[in-house]
Image: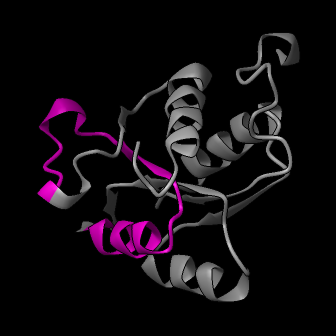
Amino acid sequence: MAENAPGQHNSLAGLKILVVDDQFLIASLAEDTLLQAGAGAVVIATNHVAAQSALSAHDRFDAAVIDINLDGRTAFDLALLLVGRGVPLIFLTGYGEDAQVPAELRDIAVVAKPYTPDMLVTPLLEAIRRGHGQG
């Protein structure tokens, strides 16, 4: 599968990416996908507390992938914090087109679950290219 891995230009090479999803299996699959696409490190957080801990424990993240719904609570506060720090990010959601994203976060790409590796990596690369959390 590595020969078909997304990000053939290694645009994620050496980057540290935060993945926040309350379903560990989905977070782990995202981690595998991002590593195959060249990411240098992926840190997984499965709830708000773990995400805050990860942000405190690491100097910085180069990008983030955040599930909109974490244990029944939205992750928009976390997204706003990351945008404020200039971290490019994308959202994941099981709600598809029905995801209600606040106006100040509407420029961030929303990827519907289930997704393919390209569906995850391509918008993340675009967010990184554009910078400042805008996808």
- Using the image, determine if residue 98 lies above or below residue 14: above
Q: Quadrant of residue 59?
A: bottom right
Q: How is the image coloured?
A: one colour
Q: Residue 52: percent from the left, percent from the top?
A: 52, 84
Q: Residue at 41% across / 66% down in the picture?
A: 83
> Which span is picked out in magenta?
74-103
Q: Quadrant of residue 69?
A: bottom left
Q: Quadrant of the N terminus?
A: top right
Farthest-out residue, top: 4
- Quick check: can you spot residue 102? no
Please say whether residue 28 is one of the residues in the magenta stretch: no
In the displayed structure, does residue 108 sit left or right of residue 123?
left
Q: Residue at 24% across / 32% down in the picture?
A: 96
Q: Residue 82: percent from the left, percent from the top?
A: 46, 70
Q: Residue 124: percent from the left, percent from the top?
A: 54, 38
In the displayed structure, does residue 73 sit left or right of residue 42?
left
**Residue situated in front as seen by the camera: 69 or 34:** 34
- Quick check: can you spot residue 49? yes
**Number of marks:** 0
Q: Residue at 18% across / 52% down in the picture?
A: 101
- Using the image, determine if residue 4 lies above or below residue 61: above
In the displayed structure, does residue 15 sit left or right of residue 2?
left
- Using the image, determine if residue 69 lies above or below residue 134: below
Q: Residue at 30% across / 75% down in the picture?
A: 77
Q: Residue 23: percent from the left, percent from the top?
A: 50, 55
**Residue situated in front as seen by the camera: 72 or 17:** 17
Please say whether residue 100 is one of the residues in the magenta stretch: yes
Q: Quadrant of the C terminus?
A: top left
